[in-house]
Image: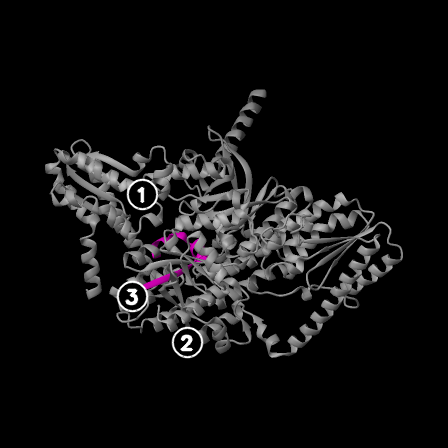
Amino acid sequence: MANIGNVSTLPDNEAQSEESLLLGQANRIGEAPKGYFAIHVHLSELRPQYRQPHYIRIAARSFDNLTGAHEATLYILRNADMVLICRDVPVGDLDPPILKLRSLFSEDPLTFGAEGSLDDRFTTWYDLAQASDFAGFLAAVEDLVATAEERVRKAREVGDSPQGAMRGEDLTPGNLTEVNERLQGVRIEDLIRRQSAIEVHPGGKGDVVFQEHYVSMFDLRQRIAPEINLFSDAWLFQYLTETVDRRILSVLAQSDFATMRDDISVNLNIATVLSPGFQSFHEKVRDHAARVVIEIQIIDIFADFPAYASARDWLRDHGYRVLIDGLNPLALQFFDPGTLAADFVKVAWNPEFLAGIPDERVSDMRQAVESVGGDGMILARVDSEDAVKWALGLGIQRFQGHFIDRVVDAMITKGII
Amino acid sequence: MSMAQATETASRQSSQENLLLDYVYRLEKHKDGRKAVLVHLSRLKPFNRREHHVRVAANSFEALVKALQGQLFMLKNCDLIFIYKSDAAPDVETAVQRVRFLFSDDPLLAEEAHADDRFSTWLDAESQFDQILNLAQSLVDNELKRESEVRAKMDTRAALKARQELGEPLTPEILTRVEAALTRADLSNLVRRQFACLLGPKGAPEPAFSELFISIKDMRETMLPGVNLTSNRWLFQHLTYSLDRRMLAMLAKTDHITISGDISFNLNVSTLLSQEFLAFDDAVPASRRGHMVVELEKVDIFSDLEAYTFAREFVQERGYRICIDGLTHQTLSMIDRERLGADLIKLVWHPDMVDGGGDIQSDLRALVRHAGENRVVLCRCDDREAVDFGRAIGVGLFQGRHVEHLIAEENRKRELRRLKARIQNN
């Protein structure tokens, strides 16, 4: 879900924060440290999604058995980190809960380094009976206290500021109708943005594959409902996109398809493609359908596969090309996009590919490229030249993203596009 | 008729499928010394059957066509049919070999032990004319069916009809009202129970678990007559959050005798991460968790895979099992149960599985074997045909009205035997 928060909303002790309680215990241990050790679990380095309170709450349960049976205390900190302090607990008893915790986050790069290896960024252990370890631990705890204070201060500032209000109230069925009505009436032409997907040829030349046309949701929200967080509920947001579809189609229908320079693409719900509204659009496009790519979201396909098959076949029979959007490298581990028989498959680039991800994930990507075919795969959200180099090595030749926008600008300046 | 409709009708009438059928009708009188070959390009990987591939493949027959040795048809599904004079057989074989060579890197040809049989079908017009005619006829029928399906979906008249039959579409306002009502309503009388069973060779059903679900149809009738709750997928999906919470509350309250045996229930991934589920989990005796299966919808799983993998680890470690619900014969091949770490999958029965033609059955059998026979539940088995088909593709578990019927039958038989025994003893 799009609602990215932090752990500051976890219920904590009103009078004393977890951090100050932790610091208190650390200081007391300093007086008689024999038998004590501590484990710092660096959950603050997880992806933002996993740092949300409901994940951390469940993760913390992994230690329930341990803290119930031994002299062990768990601290859940504001930045999502956890610190476990144990006294005379057999070290082997820590293995099961930590393994459990790692497996919960097995899709997060934080756990990719093998436990105990040099790459292991997941935990840090401190033997508090050793003076040097104790000093290191105390310094770490003091850092955590300072970080927490800083977060509280910032949260307060943001809470009072316009950015704080930006988060806004959640989208609910109750306010959905009003938002939807505003969306139907609002001026939208000037909120339509374009982004090119390009094909890279050997020797650094490139061609535009198509120009994606999309509505900037950030600007749209500013215009129709700045007080509401449109992204707080995935399904209700999806409902709104059906209206966005109708609006953008009616704008695109005004295009002169015969003379436009580049092919275009537009993201639509399957329900939209199968609606009378799309037929009116098609009346305008007619013989130029080959110049239009329809992008369809993967979850829409999973929601109703027969509808997808009908829409895809109709579109392709009438000359349109079909693109599958909304895939990330994680999704490629679980299904083969080649089975969807679309013309293009778009996968979002993830910088984690450059940061030593396990080999099998790279091979999943390679297999997907093979299944879809190199000329059907588009790497989107490309943010660096390294990403392009990495993907060319896999046989991907088509790209989209902010980095590509800059490349396109440069190519236009040099006159090679 | 508008211009557009006129051109569409014209293009339909002259489709390759229709031309083929006309040709086959005429062939009947001249079938002596004619043969046909069907080249299954549709079985190649999608990236190997783009338009230019099909064109190149078709070109292999060009010389033969020009020499009036035969007639080529390029079908919608990319397959080619070439009907030719027997004299030209060696040349035709060479042409098909050439096409085969073009795609030699495709898994169909690279891996299959009997790739030749899968790539082409050879027919003799004299002895196998009926087969050729059936093929041509079914191609035209399928095309018409497909078009009418799409048309029905796009048709205002059809939408109106659906509204009359199924009720007013669900709107955000109605959803707000339903969700508010749901927090108060007692849904226990709307809970239904259906068994998933192993079916032995003699057909005696042996329950593996029973699914508990809230009947949407009955809920609609009691709470919102005249509203079609499932008309908008996304709003309905939102409604399921509320249903999840009611279901959990009921399961936590129900005393454990009334829901004996293993049970399953549908939840959203986000519900598994909610306070309500944690409270439920705390209330359930640890020994019961191993007897509970959580069913998740594939669209929910794929809308947030990070959340799914986390939730799966969490609940499986607690002892629950995971079942992926709602797979169809079209989507089964897209999903790898083992990779998704699910314990079970549910495949929804549909008559198309039988009627859909040639490869479906053997494909499904391979997919079921890959997923594990006793990990696949064929659900919505409303009649005997469904169960028979499931057996044929190796499915181990069955659910649906027909299975309920078999259970009732079995209970009745058992009761009779008991009575008989008692009478004899007396």
Q: Nearer the viewer, residue A328 or A408?
A: A408
- Specify whether B201 is left or right of A412: right
Q: Residue furthest front?
A: A203
Q: Nearer the viewer, residue B370 or B12?
A: B370
On whether residue A309 falls in the magenta region, the answer is: yes
Q: Secondary structure at mark 3?
A: helix
Quadrant of residue B26 in the image? Answer: top left
**Marked residue nearer the N-terminal end (3 or 2):** 2
What residue appears at the point 64 percent right and 42 percent down from the top-left corner? Answer: B257
What residue appears at the point 67 percent right and 50 percent down from the top-left corner? Answer: A118
Q: Nearer the viewer, residue B105 or B182?
A: B105
Q: Which residue is mark 1?
A: B103
Whether marks 3 and 2 lie on the same chain: yes
Q: x, y (%) of residue B115?
A: 33, 35
Q: x, y (%) of residue A204?
A: 39, 62
Tell us which disc is closer to us: 1 or 3: 1
Q: x, y (%) of residue A197?
A: 40, 64
User: Is the C terminus of chain B in the top left, top right, bottom left or bottom right quadrant?
Assistant: top right
- The magenta segment is A291-311
Question: Secondary structure of the magenta portion, mostly?
Answer: helix
Residue A282's tag is: 3
- Chain for disc number 2: A
Q: Amino acid at mark 2?
A: Ile
Do tag 2 and tag 1 residues touch (Cβ < 8 Å)?
A: no
Q: Which residue is mark 2?
A: A188
